[in-house]
Structure formats: C-alpha cells, structure tokens
Amino acid sequence: MSATGIGAAVRRKEDFRFITGHGQYTDDVVRPGETRAVFVRSPHAHAKIKSIDVSAAKKLPGVIDILTGTDLATDKIGNLICGWMIHSKDGTPMHMAAHPALAAGKVNCVGDAVAVVIAETTAQGRDAAEKVKVEYEVLTAVVDPAKAQAQGAPQIHPDIANNTIYQWSLGDQKATASAFAAAKHVTKLDIINNRLVPNAMEPRAALAEYDEGSDHLTLWNTSQNPHVARLVIAAFVGMAPEHKLRVIAPDVGGGFGSKIFIYPEEVVCLWAARKVKRPVKWTSDRSEAFLTDAHGRDHVTHAELALDANGKILALRAKTIANLGAYMSTFSSSVPTYLYATLLSGQYDIPSIYCEVDAVYTNTAPVDAYRGAGRPEATFVVERLMEVSARQMQIDPADLRRRNFINKFPHQTPVIMAYDAGDYLASLKKALELADVKGFPKRRREAARHNKLRGLGYSTYIEACGIAPSQAVGSLGAGVGLWESAEVRVNPTGSVEVLTGSHSHGQGHETTFAQLVSERLGIPMENVSIVHGDTDKVQFGMGTYGSRSGAVGMSAIVKALDKIEAKAKKVAAYVLEAAEGDIEFKDGKFTVAGTDKSAAWGDVALNAYIAHKFVGADLEPGLKETSFYDPTNFTFPAGCHICEVEIDADTGKTEIVNWTAIDDFGTVINPMIVEGQVHGGVAQGIGQALLEGAIYDKEGQLVTGSMMDYTMPRAHDLPSFHVGLTETKSPSNPLGIKGCGEAGAIAAPAAVINAITDAIETEDLAMPATANAVWSALQRAKPRQAA
Amino acid sequence: MPAVSMTVNGKAVTGNVEERTLLVQFLREHLRLTGTHVGCDTSQCGACVVHIDGIAGKSCTLLALQCEGMKITTIEGLAEPGGPLHPMQEAFREHHGLQCGYCTPGMIMAALDIVRRRGNDLDEHTIRDQLDGNICRCTGYHNIVKAIAAGAKNMAKGGGARQAAE
C-alpha cells in the first residue's frame, strides 16, 4: 500500500476550500443581471384554487413578473414524473397523478406552489408574494396514511380511487401461511416507521440562465445527479432539448437522498429565466425546505415472525402502508417495494417471506428516498422481530441471531436478492467483544443502584447497495439503467483528469477517486483532478445515492484505467523500441521485460501527444479513455451494531452510553472517510430513534416545520462511536467494494429501540423515543404505585 | 438607503443597505464573502456564525445596521491569503471534521469562541455542550469534537495566523 493509495487514510483534497470559506455552493454562484424567484405557497393542505389575483402585487417595486399554474399550462410545460413503474399484485400499473410544477386548480399539500414572483431582490419578491391574492375553497385533508384508503376518505386526485397508488406484493403467500400454521412460536409487532425530514444543511437552490443567442439554458442546481435532472427536465418536462440544457451541480451541502429528485422549483426557474430573459435564482429557506423537500420513511407496518421450538425462523410476513404524500416524487415508488421488501430476509436463512405494500396519497409533502431508503424500514422490522422473539422465547438475542445466520454463499433469499459474500458471525463476534457484552450484567446492576435503567440492543443489519445491474432494475420497473461512467484524460505532462458521473456532496470523492488513480498509475495524488457535476463536462452519469459511488463509480474508473494502461503500453513500446507484449507497467514506470530499458509515466504521456515515435495509421495520438460500467449484482454490506443505553426512570431521558459498530464494507479505499460515513449514518439513525419525527396535525399543517420544532441531533445528543471493520470482498465489482454511506442510518434505529425496550422491559414504544415517550411507556407498563 | 460602515476581516467597508438587510446578507451579497452560510431561518443551525467585536454571533440574527462601526471576522479572515491556515482550520482537516463543508465555517468560528471562553484544554463533554448552537448533518459530530479539542491545544502552542478574537 502506498502512502496515498487504496487503504490509506489520506486527508481530503477538497477540505482546503471548505475550511477557508471558498466552497462554491449554488447560492454562491452569481450571474450578471440575476433576479430572484419567490414562491407563493398554499397555506392549506387540500383546497380548490378559486382565483388568483396578481394585479396589486405586480405594481410593487422591483417586481418583474408573476407567473401562475395557468401560465405554465399555456406554455405547455410538462409535469414532473416518478421514474419507477410498480405494478399492483393484480397486474395493473401504479396510479400516478399529474404533478405540475405550479398547482393547477387545486392544491394538495401545505407548501404546494401556486405562483412565483420574479423580482429584483428576494425582499421585494417576498413583499409581492404577500400581496398575491389567492382565494381557496378548503377541502377536508387526508393526513393519516392508515386512514387514506378508508371508505368515505376525501379523494385527493381525480380518478385515483381510495387514494391508492398501488397494492403490491412480494413472496410466496401460501408457503408463508403454511409455515406460520406449523410454527411453535409467532412474534407479532405493529410498527410505525416515523416520518423524517432530511435537512441537508445546505437548503435546495436553483439558478437558471437563458442564452437567447444560442437558445441554450443553464441550470445550477443542488443535485446529487445532474444528468438525470437534465434528462427528466428535457424528456419529460419538455423544457428544452437535452443538448440545449446544461445542468451544473457545484459544491452541494449534503443530500441524503433529498437532492436526487427533480423538484418543481428548478423547473419554474428555467421556465421563468426564458420568459423574463434574465437569470432567475431561487434559494429555499429552511421553512420552505421543511414543507417542500421530499420527506423520508413514513410506514405503518404489521409484521410477524414464525419460529420453531429451537428458535429457527420458519417464515416472515409483513403488511405495510407506505405514505407517498401528495405527489409521487422521482423514485418514490421503488422505496417501499424493491428497496424494502427485498431486504426482509436480513442476515437470516428464512425459507418463506411474504410482504404486501399499499402505497397511498395523503395531503402531505411527497415522500421519497432518504439515507437508506427502504432498507432502514426493512431492518427495523426484521431486527425488532428478532429481539422481541428472543425475549419472548427466552433465548439470548445474539444467540438467536447466530442460530439463523446465513453462512453459505451465494445465498438466494425468497425475496429476489442473491447475497454473494459475507461473514455475519465474524462481525457479531467482533462487536460482542468491542462492546464488552460479557460485562453488561454488571453494568446494569451498577446502574440500577443509581435508579438508572440500563439496556442493550443489537442490530445485525444487511443492505443492498451499489445499485445496480441495469438489467435487474429494469426488470423490476426502473426507468433508467444504473451503471456509471468514467472518462480518464491523461494530459501531455502526465497529470490526469477523471470525469465521473458520480457526484460528491460530502463523500470525499475528490480524495478517494484520486487515491485509486494514484495507486494504479503510480503518480502523486496532487497530479489528479476529479471532475464531476457538470453535464457539459461529463457526458452522462447516474449520480450518487444508494452507496453506489465506490462500487459502481470507481469500478468505471478502473475500467477506463485498464484501457489507459493498455494504450500507454502501446506508446511505451514505440518509445522503448520494444515489442508491446514485453512492456511492463509498475509504480509509474514502463519497463521492457528482461532489460534495463525504462520510460517514466510522464515520458509516455508526452509521447502519446507529440506522436513522433509512431504513425497515425498504427496508433492514434492522444491518451484518453472512457468506460461505462454496469455491475453484475447489488453489493451487500452488513454488520453488527450494539447500542447500550441508560435511562432515567423518573424522566424517561435516554442517554446512549456506548455505541459499537462493526461493518463489512468489502474493500475500504480510505478508512478515515469510511469511519466518517459510519458516524454520520449512525447519527441520523439515532436521530430517527430518539429525536426526529415530522408531525402533521389533522388539517395537514406541518407542526414540526422548523428546527425549533423538529429535533435535529446536536453534539450533546450523541456519544462518540466505537467503529471497526471486518472484510469480505464483494465479488460483483473489480475493487471488491460494498459501500458504506447508508449503513449507519440503516442499522441504528433498531439497535436503539432494542436497547431501550430492553431497559424498560416493554415493547410498547414508538419512535422517536423522546423522554416523554419513554416515560409514558414506563407508566403504561408499570402503573405508578400509590404514594 | 442608509449607509453602514464596519471593519470586515481587517478591511474598512461601507455599503448602502435596506434597513431590513441582515448582517449575513451584507457579507454574502454586498461583500461577496460567501463562506458564511445560511442553514436555517430560526437562528438554530449556526452555519452563519461570525465574530462580532471578537465574540461569536449568528449573522442571520443581526441587522447590518446594528453592526455600524464594529469589527467583523468571517471564515475568510482567519488565515492570511497564501499564509498558513489557522490551527483550528488545520485541525478540522486533520481530524476529518467536515464532509459536505456547509456547516464548517460556522463550526470553526463557534469553536474559536469556545476556546476564547473555556480555554485551550477542552474535554469532550464541554465541547459537545458548548456546540449547542451549531448543527451538522454529516459527521455525527464525532470528528468535529476531536478537531476542536486538537485545534484548541494547537492554538495554545501559538501556531497559526490571525487569532480569532481580534
């Protein structure tokens, strides 16, 4: 391993600009003559728009134009779409309602945009937005997903009966039912997977510019996948032909899924920029973000686990209602189906699984992928069932897991996935040691002496990452292929630019991707630039989500580097006047086998461009190669997280006193960055378990609409983490990488709730387990003794 | 529009602003110092923390006009251009105290204020407690806490450029 190669904890190349205040996020970009967009948003969750009067607002200083949904329809701007087709179990395609970028005739959630003010300044835009008169006829709102399908529930979208998008199923219902009938023990749980607001620290923003001379649009956008944004805005929204639309995602301040999607605001900015013939910028404030960013999770589930007398799992079944909100966001349909039910086998050998999922509309913000997307929900179901089963059957929870672990690979689960590599026993064993589980009973007794309830909870999670083989996802309904592209450009001086379709918004690709190139070509990392996030520079790419940039994005770079090396060897053969087959390349040097002749990397790069040593008929000048890499399987990161809590029985306040995470991510490029990803993921998982929850009242108002009402995890809410690794390489990509971005958020919620319910000795506890919730659960479980 | 004058990163600046202009807007939009960020609208997240007459403050919660005659230091003013990084900046890089970088300027400015108030020998509990006004969504704070402890220690050794509380 070199000092900067694969496996080295290299400090990040991108950090200098961020720690000196020179990052360039979308709102930092300024275009000459730029205007500001301010949206007029619905204060009602469900209402008809009777009229919109912009006349008074238009007269205010600084107002350039005010546009409404009627204008949008007149200009034939198309609707936003959901790009993953799901069929119901009866074969009918999902019911996708129209989603115009500005509401047409009716609003379906608080924050739905009904008009946009284009003004010289944001303040002037806000003044005008307040003067836009919108007359609404308020309708009854549908808020609770469990009641959305009830007879007599208000219908949100015309022609979509019972607010039901699809009724989907996976697995063998009959076989599962027979297994349950024969079971010695059945564990039953009702679970609410709480709704979360992603809250990337940089709010979404869009800046659109129209060049009249070339009829060309440019969009700077807070996007995790600018090429997909361009494709959807061109092909479906019909804003401009793809070759006349450039999308740039500069520095992006966190995504966590919420910046994958194509949102109304960017569409409106592009459309307005062309209309007013000046650049138009919109920057979300946090209140808008709470209302309009796609939320995450929001499942209502009944789950059951069937076991034999020895604790061997026979079958699992689940029925889930997934709330997709007012409109179907870009990939919303896939989250509670193929990213959820396919992971219900966990790390366990389960003969039969059956899952039904109903996806419903409600008058709330759209719900889509948020860090983990479906897999945290699946892990929570499986790992809660395991812990509760262990308690009910009086088996040690680690032992129950051991008895059921898959230990032969490949392993075909009953729910599509074929796990290709893993060692679940190894990560459990390492975690048990690091967490000192043996010493737990003593710590529990010690805590009890101080009137503290101490508990310990496991989560032996699995996820499917590195999404994914295009053919596989295509067969499941995806509207796109999920390969990745890379272009490696070697300059005449030997420095290298890598153009990647992956997008970094905190993951440190500028460092890890450069480490890969440094190792392969034997050149210093400083001589490598990583270029991403611009559709004019990178030809196409699928972007970053689903922990895919290492497994898929870096694999594409490997493939392109293979081609670079092959071509460079041809050039070296001419330079060294040797046969191509005799050229060897190692540590940045080309040598001729069996001789002392050699040429440095830089010499060969220069010779590729000056082309003095070969004729064009034999070899093309230049050194630049492209690759599109399509993986052969998902990857399956897995591991064991153990949470230890101490609860104040008088207040219900939970303190996480120890966190142990042992993860198998396959090959690790930069352990410092990987550990950082685990820390951040676990923090979000703990946030879901203890603090966070989006709450709508019965009228569809978001009660938790600011950071004063929605509890973001702060430094004093979290412990330091004990993080370690095991390694089985993924056989499905050339580097053996599995991916690490989501593991923490997937593993953590179940570990926390398993620990708390261990401490308070009742399973009757929903997330977020606030002090109030835990205290109330304690009161329900143990009625207070008479004073 | 009224005029406002202040010293920003050691340089005298003047601007004409609407009365309702916030300090952060003045810094970002008038002076083009975009290292100071806006992450919320309720004074909760701390992405906008700068030093105002040597004390950390949320620049989203002050009007520019309130800062008449004051000395403001932003993230851009911590190290001399081309000079060495401030020890706290260096510590954030060394300990991987940032991922997306958006909260980082506010974190570093808040960290320096913790050092000003609590000294150079900071334990984990103190740092976590004192970071109450700053939110990070990426790092889980683990490495931020390490970075601040290390940065504070290195400041005592006298390394780095312009000190925070000037």
Image (cartoon, coloured by chain):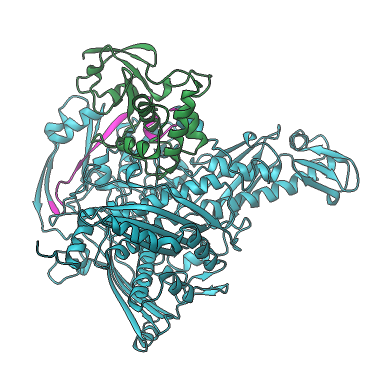
Chain colours: A cyan, B green
Q: Is A10 on the left-hand or right-hand side of A183?
A: right
Quarter residue A647 falls in? bottom left
Q: Position of residue A629 (x, y in %)?
A: 59, 55
Quarter residue A33 falls in? top left
Q: Is residue A38 magenta?
A: yes
Residue at screen point 42% across, 54% down: A659
Q: Is A370 on the left-hand or right-hand side of A58?
A: right
Q: Position of residue A109 (x, y in %)?
A: 20, 52
Query: Is A39 above or below relative to B160?
Result: below
Q: Nearer the viewer, residue A273 or A647?
A: A647
Q: How many marks?
A: 0
Kindly tell me whether residue A718 is visible in this rendering. Answer: yes
Q: Position of residue B5 (x, y in %)?
A: 28, 11
Q: Position of residue A779 (x, y in %)?
A: 17, 63
Residue at screen point 46% across, 58% down: A435
Query: Is B20 above or below relative to A261?
Result: above
Give the magenta part as a residue range: A21-48
Quarter residue A453 falls in? bottom left
Query: Is A274 above or below relative to A594?
Result: above
Q: Is residue A483 magenta?
A: no
Which corner quadrant holds the C terminus of chain A? bottom left
Residue at screen point 25% across, 42% down: A707
Kindly tell me whether residue A714 is visible in this rendering. Answer: no
Query: Is A471 above or below relative to A196?
Result: below
